[in-house]
Amino acid sequence: MTENILTLIKDGVVNGDPEQVRKYVTEAFESGMGPQDILEGGLTAGLEVMGERWNRLEVFLPEVMKSAKAMKVGFEIVKPQLGSKDSDFRMGTVVIGTVKGDVHDIGKTVVATMLIGAGFEVFDLGVDQAPSMFVDTAIEKDADIIGLSSLLTTSMAIQRDVIDLLDTLELRDRFQVMVGGAPTNQEWADTIGAQGWAADAHAAVAKAKELMETKKSS
Ligand code: B1M
């Protein structure tokens, strides 16, 4: 039963069918399934299939866009269930966004939502953001962490540009920088001097908590 609904959600994403996604995400909740399972087992799994098909040149951009839109319809239903923030309690403040030249926003939005759910105050800048935007907002909001998402090998360098800008402004010690996105890894984070890297949204929440501990003890 659980497997079945998740497969139907996944197929809805693959086929770019928002109504199918909406129907079965709603049914999944009604049957008692948790938001995390629906997100990972259905919605994200559907986009992974599209990514693999793209790699094999079996699909084109309009199909991937349709799938991404269908995924977002489901994510909007799941999102409120992921966030259980107690408004009086704050783990820390995060400014997050996708870097300049990159319009991929799904993974970044999932990470932002999970951080909110874990009790962080999050300012989501959206996509295609210049280094100065991250730094200016972090100063303005007195952030603890700057989160940089990049899904393209061509946009990864912008993560380094943000850190370079912090160095230039002598603000390097004021903020913890966390990077993420499919082409990134721990080695890249170490190379550019980011304090944190995470492979997925779960790991991003754990890393953000760890960075807060580091910040408090420094
Ligand atoms: Co694009 N795309 N895309 N795409 N797209 C990829 C990323 C690609 C790997 C596909 C491929 O070739 N196999 C490839 C990049 C290759 C590379 O550079 N290595 C690619 C390309 C080439 C492009 C275009 C250049 C295509 C073109 O125009 N010729 C173009 C780029 C436009 C631009 O940005 N300037 C493009 C466009 C698009 C769409 C608009 C069609 C659409 C995006 C829609 C949207 O976001 N609104 C799209 C999509 C959907 C994808 C794939 C299929 C799926 C991405 C996704 O949303 N995954 C992707 C293939 C793939 O990844 N398999 C692909 C689901 C999401 C939940 O996972 O984003 O990885 P992800 O996020 C994860 C982790 O990475 C991590 O946690 C998240 C949640 O678990 N994470 C962080 C992410 N950010 C983090 C930040 C953190 C910590 C963790 O801390 C701050």
Image (tube, rainbow, N blue to C red):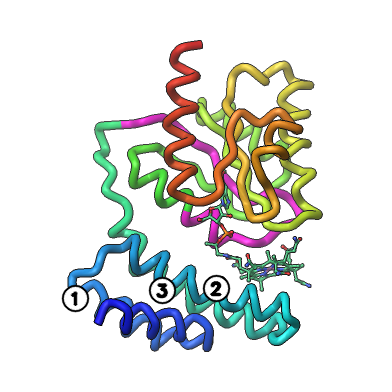
The residue at 73%/80% (across/down) is 56
- Give amino acid for label 3: Gly
Determine whether the residue tagged by mark 1 lies in a helix, strand or loop. helix
Q: Give the range drawn in magenta.
A: 90-110
Identify residue for label 1.
30
Residue 157 magenta-highlighted:
no
Amino acid at the residue labelled 1:
Glu
Q: In which quarter of the image is ligand 1?
A: bottom right
Residue depicted at 28% across the width and 43% down the height: 85
**Which residue is denoted by mark 3 in the rendering?**
42
Please tell me which residue is depicted at 52% across the width and 47% down the height of the picture: 124
Query: Which residue is tagged 2?
Result: 47
As drawn, 70 above or below 124: below
Q: Specify the amino acid type for callout 2.
A: Leu
> Which class describes the residues within 10 Å of circle 1: few (<14), some (14-19), or many (20+)?
few
- Measured from the top left, where is residue 9 in percent x and y? 39, 80
Pointer 3 local density, CA inside 10 Å: few below 14, some 14–19, many at least 20: many
209 to 22, vertically: above or below: above
- Is the residue marked 2 within 8 Å of ligand 1, measured from its CB? yes
Q: CA separation, marks 2 and 3?
A: 9 Å
Quote the CA–CA distance across marks 3 and 1.
15 Å
Q: Earlier in the sequence, mark 2 or mark 3?
A: 3
**Is the CB of mark 3 within 8 Å of ligand 1?**
no
Residue 218 placed where, x, y %?
51, 11
Between 205 and 140, the one nearer to me in the picture: 205
